[in-house]
């Protein structure tokens, strides 16, 4: 474990701030400029459509009666704390994993604020093809997905020798 926080993955926490701000600014813009379900076509396969998500990914548990808000709040706080602890324990030069963790934290905190402030998450990025529609999502969701993909990618790319060279214990 790095002795100084500047040498640890915490050095990457600026990504959390960037993701969080981009997410919150975009959601405030949508709330200020769109009515619920209002949609503007930007491309033949992409609309800006304001919807509310009371659940998690793909509206999972959206009709559960309200308790899911607190479950997802607990999960977001728990994962953010856990990933922050892991960031502190790994070297700053492990860029892929540090970037992944900070993307997930920034996204989780962005959606957490929505849940606490509104009771739902503001979604607005809406892709579709003909009559097939992908569930609307937001910048926080995008950051979480990219972060999760980087974590998976890192598990395949980073060898034991790389981890030893970076000072990571197994």
Image (cartoon, rainbow, N blue to C red):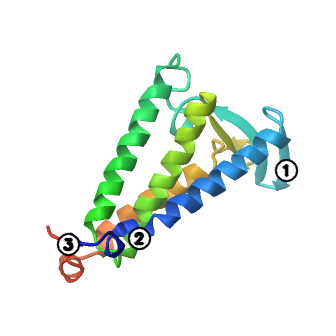
Looking at the image, which residue is at 74% across and 42% down? 131
- At mark 1, the secondary structure is strand
For disc 3, the marked residue is: 168
The reply, left or right, for residue 86 in relation to residue 165 is right
Of 54 and 133, the residue lying toward us = 54
Left or right placement of residue 100 versus residue 59 in this view: left
**Whether residue 12 is situated above or below residue 34 in the rendered picture:** below
Quadrant the C terminus occupies: bottom left
Q: Which SS class for mark 3?
A: loop
Up the image or down, 154 lies above or below 45; here it is below
Q: Which residue is mark 1?
A: 41
**Disc with the residue nearer the chain's start (2 vs 1):** 2
Q: Is residue 44 left or right of residue 28?
A: right
Foreground tag (3 vs 1): 3
Distance, label 2 to label 3, CA atoms, is 16 Å
State the SS at label 2.
helix
Residue 158 image offset from top left, x and y in percent: 28, 75
Which residue is at a point 17% across and 79% down the rendered structure image?
164
Which residue in the structure is indicated by mark 2? 11
Q: Is residue 125 visible?
A: no
Residue ID at (32%, 69%): 5
Label 3–label 1 contact, CB within 8 A? no
Residue 64 place in picture, x, y as percent: 50, 19
Is disc 2 surrounded by few (<14), some (14 to 19) or many (20+) residues within 10 Å? some
Q: Is residue 32 visible?
A: yes
Q: Nearer the viewer, mark 2 or mark 1?
A: 2
Q: Quadrant of residue 27?
A: top right
Q: Is residue 45 found left or right of 72 in the rendered image?
A: right
């Amino acid at each position: 474990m790095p002795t100084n926080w500047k040498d640890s993955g915490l050095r990457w926490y600026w990504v959390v701030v960037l993701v969080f701000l981009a997410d919150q600014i975009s959601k405030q813009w949508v709330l200020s400029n769109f009515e619920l379900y209002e949609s503007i076509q930007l491309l033949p396969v992409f609309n800006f459509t304001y919807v509310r998500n009371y659940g998690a990914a793909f509206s999972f548990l959206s009709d559960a009666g309200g308790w899911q808000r607190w479950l997802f709040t607990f999960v977001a706080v728990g994962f953010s704390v856990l990933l922050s602890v892991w960031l502190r324990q790994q070297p700053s030069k492990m860029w892929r994993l540090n970037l992944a963790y900070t993307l997930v934290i920034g996204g989780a905190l962005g959606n957490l604020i929505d849940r606490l402030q509104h009771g739902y998450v503001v979604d607005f990025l809406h892709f579709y093809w003909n009559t097939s529609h992908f569930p609307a999502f937001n910048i926080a969701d995008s950051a979480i997905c990219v972060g999760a993909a980087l974590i998976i990618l890192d598990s395949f790319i980073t060898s034991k020798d790389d981890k030893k060279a970076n000072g990571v214990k197994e």
